[in-house]
Amino acid sequence: MRSLTIDKVGVSLIFALLCITINSNAADKVCAFKLSSCPESFGGDTIYVPKNVTQISPEFFVCEPEFTIEEVTETGNPPSIMFIIDHSTSMTNGGGGSSEPMDSGGVRFKVTSALLDSIYKIYPDAEVGLTIFEKYLWINAEDNPNYASLPESYYETYPISANQDVFKTQGYIPLLKLDSTVQGGKKGIDVLKDMLEVKHAVIGSVDFESAVPVYEPKWLPDLNGGTNINVAFDATNYAMQKASYPKENQFVIFLSDGVPTVNWPRNGDDFRKGTGMPTTFTVYFNHDNSVPEAIRNMTSNIQKNAYSSSNELSWYYGMEASYDSLLNKLMTSALNPIMTVIKQKPTQLKINGIKYTDYREADSIFFINGGLKLNDSITKFNMEISYRVRKDTTSAAYDSIVNTSFTVNRTDTKAKSDGIDIVDCRDTTYFSVSVNAVDPVAQEENTESGLIEIRRVNQDYGDLTVYFEVSGTATKNADYASILYDSIVFTKGVSVQSVEIKPYKDVVKEKDETVIITLLSSKKNHNIRYVISGPDSAVVMIKDTKLQDTTNIAVLINPFSTIIPITTQLKEVLAQGIISNNVFGNLKEIVDAYKAEYGTFVYIETTIPLKTVGIGEAGLPSYGKGLLYDAIGNLIKKLDVCEIDTNKGIYGVLWDGTNKKHRKVGGGVYLLTASLFNKEEPGNPPVKMSYKIGVRD
């Protein structure tokens, strides 16, 4: 056991060091770029990037074969795709209240329209239909919605509507071949895109400005106010019954933000069974990116419902409504699987003669560890992508290779090229650092310190913060004193920082202990402006003094109670004459008398003028709080710091050897952390002291 005297100047210095404000010079940024368009689209072109872009991102985007191989496009089977779009009130005006709408920008309509263009480019004869729903289906099959070229025949009525008194003609757009010509000279793709066109309007009592369909059905009264997934899925099933292409090529893309609130034509959550549904890709709009259990169950059931061999491709995803994120997610995770039902994924990427095979299908990227470095000005890339392809569901697979090349020009005189994104910007690295234990041994005997040095180069470049973690078997402020935190600051011109490991001497018999400092090459939410060029860790060994373990701290057993506070017990013992003492109420004398017979107490000597912070459980003034931990860091008990000797300013933590459940603890080493409150510096945090306590069984 040790007693500790804390110098107020030293304490102030420690807190001052911990509160230093760092003002480092801002460093230049270097960035990477990645492709957002197919590499083939840059064939023979020059890609212009800013001068501070020094590499291509490790995530090298590639397209599926249908974007690159004409022979496959011409002979493959097209898909049948139904889009289901939720148009309930929560999408446009937050459900009629003051909550934020899930898609006030109408991105679900805009992205669907954009996807039609991509599908049309690959499969002009693909079939696509559209189901929009609220409480009922959104389209009125009797409408000719402001388009002279859209006669009633382009809509179909949901059959069960005949049983509804109000909306007998609620309908949907059935599967239309995109390149087919309809009455009025329009193509199927144009009919669908017209229905997806949006306008801005003020919605609801809170005046949300939202993008809503230009088309409005005649039956607006009583249409709003519900989310009816079942009616949408039923209508979609009816549409798929007329599909021209096999079930393996039938797909649903479902965009929604709610679970059913309407029990028609089936129980509200019946859709989760996934009965009769083709492969379904679901995007669930939510501000926290979560997906409800009903949607997860529905997807799992669709994957296993045996509708087709491609049903296992079904998935769900939660996101906030954003045009770019929704388009990217549907392109990579829905359209790519739809197109690759009959065409296989890329197998190998070769750039400038180097092969890469880590293809990640979910994102359509080859991962290139470290990225591709760029020259100072011009860098040429020759690229070869190998695909494993088959023309249809029955033909044998074969290999196909696509070749392309492009040049990257780093310049600040031209605008950044389209089809790329600037990513992964970070500070440039000017510094290199290392750590070394120049005095790796500390001794409890005579409190001889160990010493660790952290070094850096290019000290004239400015300030630098180096981050590290402290580990080892020794405990800070119990086994050693140090200003160690989790970082250290080098000011301009300083190349070496020394960290002293000064051991505390105690009488608890222990093994030798270690203090380890490990430099960090990364730290969350911090810019690392250095590289580790030498040793990244250093160890100081604290040698024990090997004193005999004679400590037996205040372990009170029979006849003392483990429930009555210790000070109350001592006063009762004194009153009964078990311990003779002439001055009743002087706790120091009571403790001294008890100590001679039973054991010892933990003393805290301090020159700090302490203030009373409350009344302890024994009714005595409390000047601080003590927390007692076992060897693995579990909190054993909370204790009061009481004054033991009024004349000398000696304080103590009175512990009866039990845990917070009043059960006697086992033998071993315990750590006591005491927090004392300084009445002369009331605004500062409490002064903390740590002690080791040995307990015998």
Image: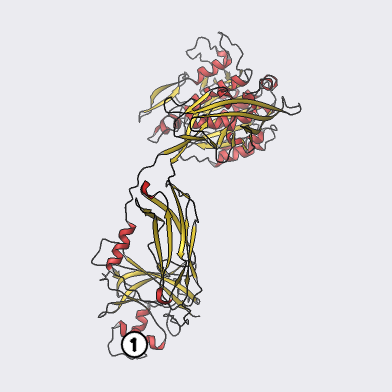
Q: Amino acid at mark 1?
A: Leu
Expressed as whole percent of the image width and height from the top left, the position of residue 124 reads 62, 17
Expressed as whole percent of the image width and height from the top left, the position of residue 618 reads 33, 76
Q: Quadrant of the N terminus?
A: bottom left
Expressed as whole percent of the image width and height from the top left, the position of residue 616 reads 32, 72
Pick the residue in front: 139 or 335.
335
Q: Is residue 215 left or right of residue 206?
A: right
Residue drawn at x 52%, y 21% is 139
Residue drawn at x 31%, y 85% is 589
Q: Which residue has dot 1 on it?
A: 574
Q: Residues within 10 Å of mark 1 (few under 14, many from 20)?
A: many
**Which residue is outermost to the top?**
184
Q: Is residue 16 above or below residue 101?
A: below
Residue drawn at x 44%, y 44% is 429
Pick the residue in front: 351 or 661.
351
Q: Is residue 573 left or right of residue 294?
A: left
Q: Is residue 23 above or below residue 413?
A: below
Q: Residue 314, located in which quarter of the rendered image?
A: top right
Q: Is residue 539 left or right of residue 82?
A: left
Q: Is residue 498 above or below residue 222?
A: below
Expressed as whole percent of the image width and height from the top left, the position of residue 378 reads 51, 29
Pick the residue in front: 224 or 237.
237
> Is residue 264 visible from the viewing direction of this image?
no
